Amino acid sequence: MTSSIKPPPIEGRLRLAVAQLNPSVGDISGNATLIRNARAEAAAAGVDLVLYSELVIAGYQTEDLVLKRAFVRRCIEAIDQLALETADGGPAMLVGTPWLDEDEKLYNAVVLLDGGEVQAVRYKTDLPNYGVFDEKRVFDAGPLPGPMDFRGMRIGVPICEDIWNDEVCECLAETGAEILLVPNGSPYWAHRSENRLQIVVARVVESGLPLVYGNQLGGQDELVFDGGSFALQADRSLAFQMPQFEAGLGISDWVKQDDETWVCENGQVSPLPGLDEANWRACVLGLRDYVLKNGFPGVVLGLSGGIDSAICAAMAVDALGPDKVHAIMLPYRYTSRESIKDADDCARLLGIRHDTVPIAEPVEGFGRVLATMFSGCEQDTTEENLQSRARGVILMAISNKFGSMVVTTGNKSEMAVGYATLYGDMNGGFNPIKDIYKTQVFHLSRWRNENFPKGLLGPEGHAIPDNIITKVPTAELREDQTDQDNLPPYDVLDDILSCLVEHEMAISDIEKRGHDKALIQKIEHLLYIAEYKRRQAPPGVKLTEQNFGKDRRYPITNRFRDRS
C-alpha cells in the first residue's frame, strides 16, 4: 500500500484555485473526472487548495434524486476515492457532496480531502426553501459550523445559502476562521451578480474576513448556473473576478499580513457582460446543456418566418452550431409569401438545413373526418388549432424518426395569456425563450444582430433578417390576422404582465400606471385560465425572478379574481 505524502503546512502563503466546472446531475463518474482534471491542472500550477462548487460530485440541483440512498452512497464512494488520490501530496480539495452521518441523516455537505483522507466535513446550515429551492424537502440542516484546520490554517466554509444571513459567517469568524471559502450552486437570473455582490460585501463587513465565492457553471433543466466566481478582500475591494458562462480554473495567491489578514496579491479580473449579453448567453448555455446532457444529436424546429421561431433558431445555432439545427417551414393557405421568404432568409443567414412540409392535406383531412360532427357550427379557433396541431404532429414525427429534439418557441407573453396551442406549437422538449416577454424578444433580436459574444457557434453579424423584426406579428391562422386583433400592443401587455407576474401587484396599483382597469382584469383572467397549459409546457431557461416553472406555483383550479 502506498503511503501518503504529508504536505507542508501553510505558512503565510496560500495558492488557491477555484474550479468553475459544469457538472451533470447524476453523472458521478463524469463529475469525478471533471474534479480530477481540475486538480491535475491546479497541481501543475503549484496550487495548495482547490475550491469546487456545491454538490459538485452529484450535480446541482439533484431534487429528489438525492433521496435515493444508492445514489448518495455512490457519491460518498467517489469522494472516498478522490480522498485517496490526495495521498500524492498535491493540492487538497474542498468538494461539495451529499453526506450521511452515523444516524443516516442526509446533509448537503462539503468535505476537505487532503493527505489521502477525508480530513473534515461541514454541513449546510441554512437550507433555502423559496423560489427554485426546495432543500428542506430533501436535506437535514446542519449545526452552526466551526472552521476547518487546513495544514495549520483555519478556513471557514459556509455553503451557498449560509452566507445569505449573518449567523453562519459570524459563528465562523468568532471561532477563529481566517478566510471564508464558499462553494455555491447559485443560478442565474437578471441582475443576480449585483445581488450576490451585495450579500458578500455584507458578510465581509460583518466578519472582517476575505471571502471567496466559487460558483457552478452550466444548464440543469430550467436553471442556468453562470459561474462568475469572485472574491473580496477584507477591505471589500475586488480580489478577483472569473468570467460568467465559461468553465475554467481561477488561480490566486493569498498572503498573510502582519495584522493576520489574508490579502490576495494577483487576482485576475474578467469583465462581466451587460444584461443583454448575459441573457442571451444564459439562453444559449441552457439550451446547449439540455440538448447535449440529454443525449440529443441536434434539434428541429418550425421556422415560420416570425420573430419567435427566428430568435430560437439563432439561439440554437449559437448553442450547437448550424449542422445540428434543422428548420422546417410548414405552410398552409394563410402563410404569406413574405413569411416563406423571411424563413428562407433566416435559414440562409444561419447556415442551417431548411425543408418545407406543406400541411394542407393533414389539416383538411382532419376537417373532413370532423365535418359531420361539426355540421352547423361556425368556424372558430378550433380550425385554427388544427393547423397548429398538424404542425406539432409533423415536427414530433421528424423528431421521432431522426432523434433530434423539438425546440418550442412560445415567448413569455404568449405563455402568460394562453396564446399557444396545446399539442401544437407547445410541442417540444425545451424552450429557450419561455421566460422572455415579446418586447424583449424584439430587443434581443436587434441586439444579437449587432453583437457577437464569446463562445457562440453561429454567424457573426446578422442572424435574424431585419424584416422579421420590423413586420407586424401574426400567427397566420386566418386571413389578415395580427396578434393585436385580440391583444393590446405588446408594450402594454408586457407591462401589465410584469406587474401581475413578477411583482404580484393589485389591479388598483396597476391601474395607477395608466392602464385601463377592464383590460388589466381581462389579462389577469387570461393569465389564470392558462395555468393548465403552462403545467404541460416544456421547460425553458429561467431569466427572471418569477419564471413559469419552479418559481410561480399557482393552482390550476382557481376562482379568485382581483376586483380591487
Image: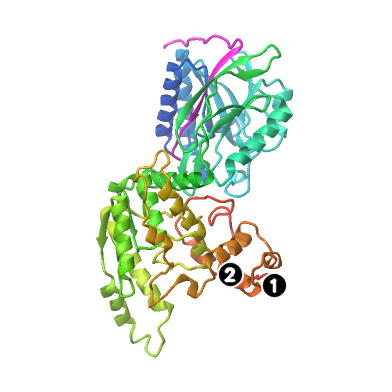
Q: Amino acid at mark 2?
A: Ile
Q: Is residue 2 magenta?
A: yes
Is residue 371 in sight in this rendering?
A: yes
Among numbered discs 1 and 2, the one appearing first in the sequence: 2
- What segment is highlighted magenta in the picture? 1-25
Nearer to me, 240 or 6: 240
Q: Residue at x 40, y 29 (%)?
A: 33
Which element is circle 2 on? helix
> In 3D space, how far apart are the residues under numbered discs 1 and 2 (Cα atoms)?
13 Å
In the displayed structure, would residue 466 be above or below residue 243? Answer: below
Identity of the residue furthest to the bottom in this view: 376
Nearer to me, 260 or 277: 277
Is residue 434 in sight in this rendering?
A: no
Q: Amino acid at mark 1?
A: Arg
**Residue 152's mark?**
none
Residue bearing mark 2: 523
Residue bearing mark 1: 563
Residue 388 locus on image (x, y percent): 37, 69
Does the CB distance between marks 1 and 2 fall below 8 Å? no
Q: Residues within 10 Å of mark 1 (few under 14, many from 20)?
A: few
Q: Main secondary structure of the magenta part?
A: loop
Q: Residue at x 67, y 61 (%)?
A: 505
Residue 323 locus on image (x, y percent): 28, 47
Nearer to me, 355 or 125: 355
Q: Is residue 301 magenta?
A: no
